[in-house]
Amino acid sequence: MPRAMTMTEKILAAHCGQDQVQPGDNVWVNVDILMTHDVCGPGTIGIFKERFGKDAKVWDPTRIPIIPDHYIFTADDKCHRNIQILRDFVTEQGIPYYYDPDFVNTQAGSGMPNPYRDPTQTNYKGVCHKALPEEGHCRPGEIMLGTDSHTCTAGAFGQFATGVGNTDAAFAMGTGKTWLKVPPTMKFTFKGNIPPYLTAKDLILAVIGQVGFSGATYKAMYFTGDGVQSLSLEDRMTLTNMAIEAGGKNGICDVDEKTLRYVEARSNRPDWTVYQEDVNAEYDGEFTWDLNDLEPLVAKPHSPDNTATARECKDIKLDRAYIGSCTGGKITDMIFAANILHGQQVKIPTFVVPGSTEVHADMKRLGLDGEPVKEGQKNIEQVLQDAGCLLGAASCAACLGGPQDTFGRLNEPINCISTTNRNFPGRMGHKEAGVFLASPLTAAASALTGHVTDPRDYINGPITTGSAGIC
Amino acid sequence: MQSTVRGKAFIMGDNIDTDQIIPAEYLSYNPADPEERKYFGMYAMAGVPKGQLGLPDGNTRFVPENEFATEFRIVIGGKNYGCGSSREHAPLAMAEAGAQVVIAEFFARIFYRNCVNGGYLLPCESVERLVDEIHTGDDCEVNIETGTLTNHTQQKTYQLKPLGDIAPIIEAGGVFEYAATKGMIKD
C-alpha cells in the first residue's frame, strides 16, 4: 500500500523524482517558477553573479518572472537605481516576463515618478502576488519560489509556493533547484457558504487567532471544504496569502472548476498536473469552522493573532483607513469596499491602492455588481472617489511602510484599519502606529464611522462580484 | 566554522520580526554593493520599539548611532525569532554589524533558512527560555561541539539543541558551498 499523501507531499514527491515523501524528509526539488522583485532582485542578482560568474546565464529565462512593485512611487534615487539593475539584467538574460514601470526615469535626481496615465497602457503590473496569476504564472501542481514571504499566495491555485531569501533565489536562478524539508500538513475545513458580511480575510484571521501566529511554523496549511469552494479565486488568495502570518511554509487549496477556469484563461503554459488530497492523508492538527458561526474579525496591534470581533472593538477610534495590498487590493476587494461606501462619505482619511494595474483598469471598467459598467452607472473608482477616498497607483505602497514619501505611509503614531496582512510594530511606517487588520468590508464600514465597525451595519443583501478578477 | 564564539550577549523578546531587525525603508540599499552593504549594519535592529531593545533595561542600542559595528556577538531572543518578511537583509544586517550567533527558543522558518543557506549567522535553538535569565552585556560563549551556551558573567551553562539535518550545510558555510561539495555546482 503506498502511503496516503497530502497535495503538498505529492507535489514535492513529483518534483524530486520520488514516488512518495513524508514529513521531515529533506529533498532537492526542481523549481517551476522563480519570482523576484525590486527589493530583493538586486541582492539576488548580485549573489547569482558572484557565485556563477559575471557572464553566467539563468537556468531558464522563461521561468523567472521579475515584477517590480514595492518602491515605485518614491523620489528615492536608490529605488530607481534598483529598477535599472532589473532592466539591465532582463536585457542581458533575455528574460521575457519582466513588467517594467516604464514611467520611471532612473536618472539620479529624477524625483517622484508620474504614475501611468492609463492602467491599460503600461507594461507595469503592480503587486507581484496579484500579477503572477494575472499574467499566467500560477498553475496547479507546480513549485513556485519567490523572494517575498507572501509568495505562499499562489497556493490558492493548488500549487506549492513559498517565500525564500536572496541566496536561495540566486541558487535556484542558476540551477533550477532548491532543497526543501517536507512539511507536515495542518487541515482547516470551512463548512457552508460565504455570507455577504464575511470575506476570506475573516476566515484566515479566525485561523491565525486559533493557532497563533507561530502555530503553523514549518507546516503546510491546507484549506478545504465547501466554504472554501464558495470563495472566488481572488478571495482564496487572501487565505493562502496569510499562511505565513501563522508561520506556515505554504498554504494550499483544492483545485476545482473555478481554479481550472481561471488557469485555463490565463496560464502561459499549456500543461499542468492536478493533485488531490488522499482521503487518508495524515494531518498535524485539524480545525473546522461553520461559516454561519463566524463573525467579522479584526487583528489588533501588533500581531495578526491578536484577534477580536469587530463588534468587540466598536469603541476603538481610528485615524485612517487603508484599502490595498496583495491581500486586500484585488478587484473583488474593491467591489466589496465600494458596495459599503457608495453614496456615503468617509469620516477619516481613506487611502485606496489597487493591487495591480489590471485591478485599476477594472475599477474603471466595472460597476458595483462586478459587471461592465452600464450607461448612467458609476464605476468602482468613481464610487470610491465620490465617497471621499484618496486613490493611489497600483503598488505595494504603505502595506510595508517603505520610503518616507510612500503613499498612505503611517508617518505618525496613529490608528489605521487596513486590509493588509501584517501589523507588527512599524510595519506600515511609524513604530508606535497601531494597525488593525480587517476585511475590505470591515475597513470600509469603519471608514464611514471613524471607529472599528461591523460591516453588518451597512449590508442589506448579497454583494455579487460577477466575473470580476477571473478572465 | 569556528567551534566557539565568545562575546557580549544582546537580549531580545518574543516574536522579533524582520521588519524590526531591518525596517523596510532601508531596503533600498543594495546588499551586492560593498559600500551600501555597510548600512545594513548601521540600521540593524532600527525597528525594535523603545523598551524592547537590549533586555532587561530595553534601551540599549544594538549599534551606536552613526556607527556600523555592534559590540554584541551573540543575539538571544525568545519564541518565533525572525518571523514576517522573507528579507534576507535581516540576518545579513545582524552579521554585517558583527553578530555571529543567534539563539532562540524557535525560529521562523525563512529567517532560519536564510541564516543557514546564506552562511550569515549560526542559528541555535535553546532547550529552555534564556531571555529572562541572561542580561544584555553578559559575557557569553557558545560551544558548538558540546552544544552549550555558557554565561561567564553569571557562571551558568545552558544546553542548546543539536543542529540536526542542516548541520552539513552549516559546516560547509552555506548552500552554495554545500552544493559544491556534493558536485551539484562547480566549486
Image: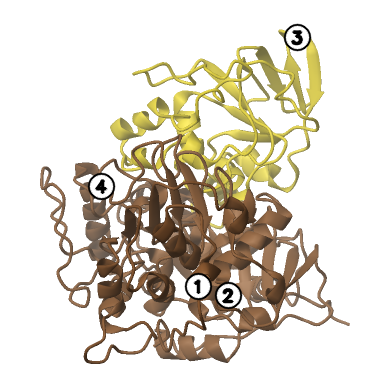
Residue at the spot of label 3: B154
Q: Residue A73 vs residue B47: left or right?
A: left
> In the rendered image, is residue B31 in sight?
no
First in sequence: mark 1 vs mark 4: 1
Residue at the spot of label 1: A32
Position in image of residue A346 (x %, y %): 34, 60
Drawn colour of chain B? yellow
Q: Give the CA separation, mark 3 to mark 2.
A: 51 Å
Q: Are marks 2 and 1 in contact (CB under 8 Å)?
A: yes
What chain is tagged by disc 1? A
Q: Amino acid at mark 4?
A: Cys
**Of discs 2 and 1, which sits in the foreground?**
2
The quadrant of the picture occupied by the N terminus of chain A is bottom right
| The quarter of the displayed image where residue A336 is located | bottom left
Q: Residue A120 vs residue A292: left or right?
A: left
Which disc is residue A194 wearing? none
Q: Residue B121 vs residue B87: left or right?
A: right
Residue at the spot of label 4: A79
**Of discs 3 and 1, which sits in the foreground?**
3
Q: Amino acid at mark 3?
A: Gln
Residue at the spot of label 2: A159
What chain is tagged by disc 3? B
